Image (spheres, rainbow, N blue to C red):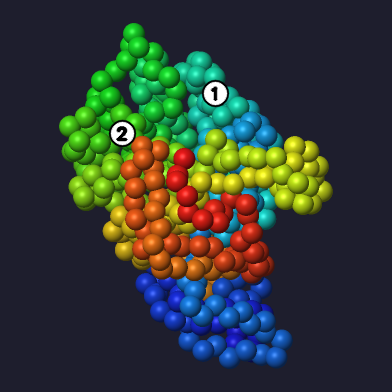
Amino acid sequence: MTTSELELILRGGRVIDPAQGIDGVMDVGILGGRVATVAPALAPAPRTKMINVRGKLVLPGLIDTHAHIYEHVTGMFGLNADLVGIRSGVTTVVDQGGASPLTFNGFRNFVAQPAKSRVLSFISIYLAGGLMGHSHAGLYGPHGIDVGATVRAIEENRDLVKGIKTHAEIGGYSRWGIEVLKLAKEASRRARVPVYVHLGGMWPVVKESEPDPDSILNQVLPLLDEGDVLAHPFTRHPGAFVAASGKVHPIVTEAVMRGVRIDVGRGVHFSIEKARIVLEAGIMPFTLGADLHGYAVKRVKADAADAVPAPKGRRSRGNGEQLTATFNLHQAMSELLALGIPLGEVVSMVTSNAAVLLGLDGQIGTLAPGAVADVSVVRLERGDWTVRDASGVELRLAERIRPDFALREGVMYKSNSPLVPEVITAAA
């Protein structure tokens, strides 16, 4: 390949590719839907398309490791994959627990295949999956799990399924103890995929059997293997990383040292105070998932011109809704910057580290020659903004990351999703 054959050159941006140790002003050359070369001052051919990205960050396609995109089946909880993904400047989205062994074919055919984004899944350990946003707690005990069916679904869908979603939160624990996680681990070991464990709160607690929140991790962590994932380290809810004492459980550090990974799973329960405690204890997340879902999105009636358009070939929702999000993946990245994590480490969380977590390192999450040409171009803006968590704690931002456009296998998509907040607002 010579530079004269390049179909597209992204000219003059600051390229950050942690997988290759690159951070500098360079050009990115694209050919045949793949990265051809990354180098300064590439020479274009007469037919080479040039896009000027000077002053912008050129990153491997962003990977959101925690999304909720099983639209309709999960009720108001599930969002459109491309509104969360490619139209938000995110090339890969991982649905966490929406699809189950009983509903996975629907997920494949009606979510993953039509999407322009790359859509992957951590399949639910529960047969009910994310039906109606997990609103019926009684469906989610050991009685609602079929380990064999879960393993079969994974084996039949390994191209999409990269792990198992389960919970070890205080409400479920008050009902069933640790049994759900034990079954999830049985399935994960048989299928050779990691589990992704939701910590904190979710379902109402049964008062008669309410556990000591600080006792939960002591039973959860010994069950986990290298490569398994703990979600929501910064949750404001009890039963997670920060004990009632206000300090991080020592067992968390031990788990990280033996290879258990941490995903931010920002969500609506993100606590600035808890984040500071965890980070000051030296606990660094491995990946950053936004955990944006329909309950964190505001829906207002809109004129037809402002309503969310239906994907080509599909009927409109017919409800004339205009959607706005109170946070997204880029805001979560901005918050980590404000909490003192260097830009390069934040980029790693949503690119190279995320690819490792999914078992796709070298294929996505990098701009290495031959990798799929998934590229996210963003602006690093400087100013003065304030975000607030659900407890009203404020965090000042001197920098924020905003999406401009993305390439998915070399095809350009503008970041025009209504789920990209126009102005950083108080977080839900």
Q: Which mark is residue 135?
A: 1
Which amino acid, mark 2? Answer: Ala
34 lies above or below 108: below
Q: Secondary structure at mark 2?
A: loop
Residue 287 lies, in percent from the top left, at 40, 51
> What is the spatial separation of the Cα atoms under label 2 and label 1, in whole angstroms?
21 Å
Which quadrant of the structure image shows residue 414? Answer: bottom right
Q: Residue at x 72, y 44 (%)?
A: 302
Residue 344 lies, in percent from the top left, at 36, 66
Residue 99 lies, in percent from the top left, at 59, 34
13 lies above or below 320: below
Q: Which mark is residue 16?
A: none
Instruction: Judge the density around disc 1: few (<14), some (14-19), many (≥20) Cα neighbours within 10 Å.
Output: some
Which amino acid, mark 1? Answer: Ser
Instruction: Judge the density around disc 2: few (<14), some (14-19), many (≥20) Cα neighbours within 10 Å.
Output: many
Q: Residue at x 21, y 50 (%)?
A: 280
**Is label 2 in contact with label 1 (beta carbons under 8 Å)?**
no
Of the image marks 2 and 1, the number of the one nearer the N terminus: 1
- Is residue 303 or residue 360 the one in the foreground? 303
Residue 167 lies, in percent from the top left, at 42, 29
Q: Residue at x 76, y 46 (%)?
A: 303
Q: Which mark is residue 240?
A: 2
Res. 214 in view: yes
Instruction: Determine whether, in the image, residue 337 is placed left or right of residue 144.
Output: left
Residue at the extreme top of the image, as rendered: 208
Which quadrant of the structure image shows residue 169? Answer: top left
